[in-house]
Image: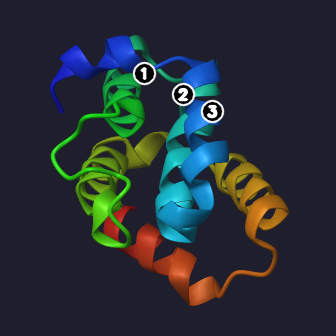
Amino acid sequence: MDNKYSKYFSEQSLWDKLRKFGKGAGAKVVYAVLLLYYTFEDKSVGIKTKLSIAAALGYFILPTDAIVDLTPIIGFSDDLGVLLFTLSAIATNITPETKAKAREKLHDWFGEINPEELSEIENNTF
């Protein structure tokens, strides 16, 4: 992931994007975002890893990405690809605590989620 996108990442922008588009993006995209965000917040994660995460989250936040996010279903497919690529690259930094935080926040927003939907993200990345 090109680190030029990291300049678009801020905690406020991330939460604003999730509030505005989270339901439309779907549980898979939001779970991937939350995994990256909570890994970014982990004090034991190195700066190089944090830069990669910031770039991926910046790409997610960026309003003018490859496929416009307002387009139903396919609008977040490019974002999901970037998020999954980054999750794969930083997989060793994702702790059980990080997964638990992400699942808890996802449950707050979406209610019960089919565990297979989330395991699809986990199995394809770490």
Give the residue type that dot 3 points to.
Asp
Q: Of discs 3 and 2, which sits in the foreground? A: 3
Q: In this view, does 108 lie to the left or right of 32?
A: right
Pointer 2 local density, CA inside 10 Å: few below 14, some 14–19, many at least 20: many
Which residue is drawn at the image coordinates 59% and 55% (left, top)?
A: 22
Q: What is the basis of the colouring in this image?
A: rainbow
Pointer 1 local density, CA inside 10 Å: few below 14, some 14–19, many at least 20: many
Pointer 3 local density, CA inside 10 Å: few below 14, some 14–19, many at least 20: few
Quick check: can you spot residue 94?
no
Q: Of discs 3 and 1, which sits in the foreground? A: 3
Q: In which quarter of the image is the N terminus?
A: top left
Tell me: residue 29, above or below residue 87. below
Q: Is residue 41 left or right of residue 8?
A: right
* Alpha-carbon span between mark 2 and mark 1: 5 Å
Which residue is drawn at the image coordinates 31% and 60% (left, top)?
A: 75
- The local secondary structure at tag 1 comes to helix
Q: Quadrant of the C terminus?
A: bottom left
User: Residue 58 location, x and y as percent?
Assistant: 37, 27
* Alpha-carbon span between mark 3 and mark 2: 17 Å
Mark 3 and mark 2 lie on one chain; the one further toward the N terminus is 3
Which residue is drawn at the image coordinates 23% and 55% (left, top)?
A: 78
* Alpha-carbon span between mark 3 and mark 1: 20 Å
Give the residue type that dot 2 points to.
Phe
Residue 40 is marked as 2
Tell me: residue 25, above or below residue 2. below
Quick check: can you spot residue 101?
yes
Q: Which residue is tagged 3?
A: 16
Q: Which residue is tagged 1?
A: 50
Q: Nearer the viewer, residue 2 or 13?
A: 13
Residue 29 is marked as none
Give the residue type that dot 1 points to.
Lys
